């Protein structure tokens, strides 16, 4: 890949990137003599982000100790693999690090979500119930209804949604993953994420209405 300087930007393969981003793209491209070193440097940054995100989501995942550290390393490794596979798709709309960090944030969210829903003995806590309920447009229930609604939401998310809808709903409504990060990880765009969220909310709400949990 050839690079030239122009007006403070670096043209890498005909595309204008900031100098730091251009260096990352060049060194992470196939055949680069600095590929392995660039991967090591990028992994060090990704694992830092992954550790921060897994710690922030630990109350949801109920993971701690060595298992939490292992999840962070898995997320960083998977993110690195996807970044190197998609390096040719980087367009320079944001800095390379901003673009790359979206991948690891979503990898953490995906792995936390899978762990959370794999264990059917775990139900939503109060904060998670509030987030999910707000996402489907429900009013706060009376205290006596709270536990039943929490269980119903868990059941609906697990059994009513498609796998894709569940991934999107959990990431956006419960785990607070930025939509841009989610769209990048799923190879889609914000409009498609909005559509999936709309469908998920509609399906959950229909289940809750049909079973007399909400009006």
Image (cartoon, helix red, strand yellow):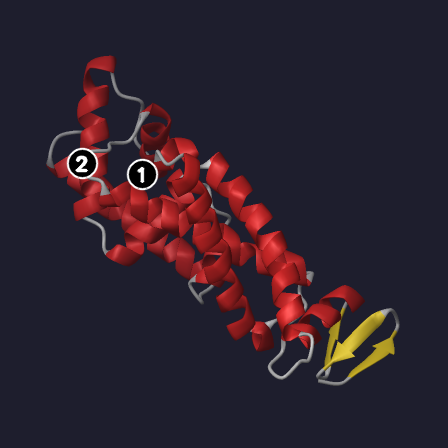
- Marker disc for residue 208: 2
User: 82 and 95: which one is in front?
Assistant: 82
SS for callout 2: helix
1 or 2: tag closer to the N-terminus: 1
Identify the residue under disc 1: 136
Horizontal side of residue 128 vs 122, given as left or right: right
Residue 174 vertical position relative to residue 30 in the rendered view, above or below = above
Q: Residues within 10 Å of mark 2 (few under 14, many from 20)?
A: some
Q: How far across and how far down the image is residue 204, in percent?
A: 23, 43
Residue at position x 43%, y 47% in the image: 70
Alpha-carbon distance for marks 1 and 2?
Answer: 10 Å
Q: Residues within 10 Å of mark 1 (few under 14, many from 20)?
A: many
- In the image, residue 135 above or below residue 107: above
Residue shown at the point (46%, 43%) measured from the top left = 69
Whether pointer 1 and pointer 2 mark residues with C-beta atoms closer than 8 Å, the reply is yes
The quarter in which the N terminus is drawn is bottom right
Q: Position of residue 66 (x, y in %)?
A: 42, 40
């Amino acid at each position: 890949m050839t690079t030239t300087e122009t007006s403070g930007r670096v043209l890498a393969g005909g595309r204008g990137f900031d100098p730091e981003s251009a260096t990352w793209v060049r060194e992470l491209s196939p055949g680069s003599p600095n590929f392995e070193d660039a991967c090591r440097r990028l992994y060090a940054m990704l694992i830092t982000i992954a550790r921060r995100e897994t710690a922030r989501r630990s109350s949801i995942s109920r993971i701690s100790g060595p298992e939490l550290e292992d999840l962070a390393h898995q997320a960083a490794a998977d993110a690195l693999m996807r970044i190197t596979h998609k390096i040719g798709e980087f367009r320079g709309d944001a800095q390379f690090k901003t673009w790359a960090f979206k991948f690891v944030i979503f990898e953490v969210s995906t792995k936390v979500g899978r762990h959370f829903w794999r264990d059917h003995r775990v139900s939503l806590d109060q904060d998670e119930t509030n987030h999910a309920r707000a996402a489907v447009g429900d009013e706060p229930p009376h205290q006596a209804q709270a536990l039943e609604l929490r269980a119903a939401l868990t059941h609906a998310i697990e059994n009513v949604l498609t796998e894709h809808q569940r991934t999107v709903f959990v990431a956006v409504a419960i785990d607070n993953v930025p939509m841009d990060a989610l769209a990048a990880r799923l190879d889609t765009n914000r409009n498609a994420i909005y559509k999936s969220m709309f469908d998920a909310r509609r399906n959950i709400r229909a289940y809750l209405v049909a079973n007399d949990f909400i009006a």
